[in-house]
Image (cartoon, grey):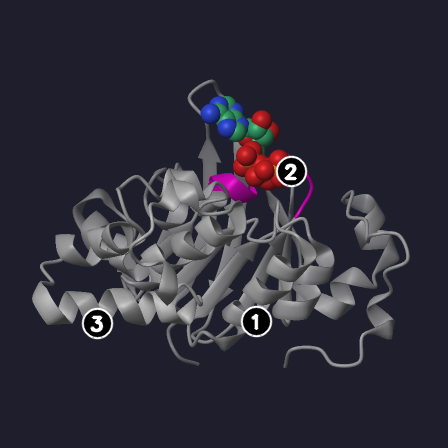
Amino acid sequence: MTTPVLDVRRLAFAYPDGHQALYGVDLHVHQGERVALLGPNGAGKTTLVLHLNGILTAGAGTVTVSGLPVAKANLAQIRRRVGVVFQDPDDQLFLGSVRQDVAFGPANLGLRGKALDRRVMDALDKVGMADFADRPPHHLSFGQRRRVAVATVLAMEPEILVLDEPSSNLDPTSRRELADILRSLDVTVLMVTHDLPYALELCPRSVVLSDGVVVADAATFDVLTDDALMAAHRLELPWGFDPRSIDSLPG
Ligand SMILES: Nc1ncnc2c1ncn2[C@@H]1O[C@H](COP(=O)(O)OP(=O)(O)OP(=O)(O)O)[C@@H](O)[C@H]1O
């Protein structure tokens, strides 16, 4: 098999106060996969994500991205390869216009002029926000800001797109539109979510983290229909939602 885009091996991590958040986590994601990372509050999902682009450094174990270890010496390259979209878009939007925010990353890589403009407009097109390029981000709705935050990351042409709770605080239409956008992207995706129908709709595979340990790694449908697993790890489907009633699942 090919080298995974993301290869996490025996990753363990304790916060400085001694709280052990991850105990020997293994996670392998191959090119083109869309994988949901599920688990109850406090499971360690964010802690794991913060290791993927080197915001946190592994206590033990390794994280590699397309063969390159996440380590201080490689951080610039790692951050080009791993694009993280945080839950709050305002963590990623801080300039005067949408265009400037999306240009910020690629301009730091040295892109200028027409190549930079093209990169920015391509990324905005992908998220359906090209018409908003000259608007100040703080004049946009939350859902629009989330799309622009995705564009800021896509503009870096990452090898893996990591999304933390992408559907949170979106109205049903924006939630569906973002799902359509994510499905249309030709990029490997790891998505942290509590929105289990969203995971089912978008990700053929799910990994369940609970108390810092991977307790399941299987087809999303199989995870969501495993009542014992779901109950043991405080995962609950919305009332009335039955995965078996969905006609077509992502392949
Ligand atoms: N800075 C910190 N210092 C000490 N412990 C922390 C810190 N941040 C998180 N933790 C603890 O680490 C564990 C994992 O937290 P983490 O935020 O990774 O969980 P999560 O799965 O992302 O949860 P949620 O679904 O609520 O976002 C929790 O027990 C949490 O209390």
Q: Earlier in the sequence, mark 2 or mark 1?
A: 1
Amino acid of disc 2:
Asp
Name the image quarter holding residue 220: bottom right
Residue visible at 41% across and 63% down in the picture: 129
Residue 248 covered by magenta stretch: no
Residue identified by numbered label 1: 180
> What span is in magenta?
39-47
Q: Which mark is residue 211?
A: 2
Amino acid of disc 1:
Asp
Is residue 165 visible in the rendered image? The answer is: yes
Residue identified by numbered label 3: 118
Residue 43 covered by magenta stretch: yes
Q: Is residue 21 above or below residue 122?
A: above
Q: Identify the residue at the far top of this view.
A: 17
| Separation of marks 3 and 1 at Cα, in angstroms | 23 Å
Q: Earlier in the sequence, mark 3 or mark 1?
A: 3
Is residue 125 toward the left or the right of residue 73 in the image?
right
